[in-house]
Image: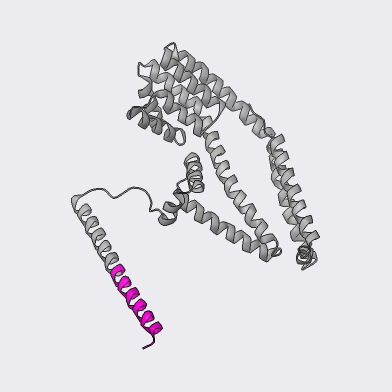
Amino acid sequence: MNPLILITLGATLLACVFVILGLQAYAAGRAQRAALIERLSASGMPEPLGRRRRFQGVDRRLRKTKLGRRIELKLAVTGLDLTAGEFFVYMLAAVAGIWMISASFFAPFFGPVAGLIGLWAANAFLNWQRARRTERFINQLPDLARILANATQAGLALRTALGIAAEELEAPAGEELARVTDRLAVGHSIEDALGEIAERLPSRELVVLVSTLVLSNRAGGAIVDSLRNLTITLEQRKETRREIRTQLSQVTATAYLVPVLGIGSLLLVDAMMPGALDRMTGSFIGQTAVLIALGLFAVGFVFIRRLSRIDV
């Protein structure tokens, strides 16, 4: 018999053996899992809380990379109920969808450009979620300072006052303070536990509050009077930030209107002259002109956003 046929038959039989062994191992694992669930149900133990995570294999592999650790850190700051693997898969699906839609509506040249914009938009979404969570936390700082002042005036320790504030306040302040109380329970100092909040949600108001609490806990002093004065100051800064945001709302809308006008003009040109975008992006000069135009729209958006950013 031909040696090549023998090798092929041997490899096929070996593959079948491995398939059978794999199926047996999979069936045994499923049976063990079912038996474990049955024993836990019979013992009356509660079912695990939280939703079932998707793409666990992708998440495990992604966490080993630098990109995965960076995504996980940003997700922890934003407070989103997503794993790094879930966000990565959703981001790739969104980028692929934007790529296909742009290539269909405009021209094939716009597919990769839209994909890059989609990647930038995913990172911008995480930054926006972080800024939004920070803003919500800042708005809760007057209530936090008031609760801490009342608790310390009643004779409670600062650790106990932080625990009461974690129970009374809603997210994100309640969640962040719950982390602080958990770290205090395992032996971390107040300075380290509060300093982590200032690193995750950076703001001037939070830095002032953390500094007041740390100094009062370290050196003593009239913490009640300091917290009450800080509460009044935080209320005034909150109102000032709200007025500034209202005054700059038109400028912010203009910043987002600039790229919308650019995309709308491309759609208008293609509607008036069907195939114009294909002919325009079919040459190197046309592609260069389109990239320069998109870059100018992006520069205009960034400049308007920078000019409308006022630190209070």
Residue 220: percent from left, percent from top: 42, 12
Picture layout, residue 174 above or below residue 216: below
Seen in the image, is 278 located left or right of residue 136? right
The N terminus is located in which quarter?
Answer: bottom left
* Residue, far top: 221
Which quarter of the picture shows residue 107? Answer: bottom right
In the foreground, 64 or 173: 64
Question: Any magenta on residue 10?
Answer: yes
Q: Residue at x 55, y 24 (%)?
A: 235
Residue 141: percent from left, percent from top: 50, 27
Identify the magenta region: 1-22
In the foreground, 225 or 213: 213
Q: How is the image coloured?
A: one colour
Seen in the image, is 140 located left or right of residue 104? left
Q: Residue at x 77, y 60 (%)?
A: 268
Picture layout, residue 260 above or below residue 163: below
In the foreground, 171 or 297: 297
Seen in the image, is 54 located left or right of residue 241? left
Magenta: main secondary structure equals helix
Which quarter of the picture shows residue 303? Answer: top right
Q: Residue at x 74, y 54 (%)?
A: 291
Residue 54 shows in this picture: no
Picture layout, residue 234 above or below residue 254: above
Picture layout, residue 307 above or below residue 254: above
Residue 38: percent from left, percent from top: 22, 57
The C terminus is located in which quarter?
Answer: top right
Seen in the image, is 258 located left or right of residue 45? right
In the rendered picture of this protein, how many numbered marks are placed on residues?
Answer: 0
Residue 148 shows in this picture: yes
Question: Any magenta on residue 258?
Answer: no
Q: Residue at x 36, y 16 (%)?
A: 154
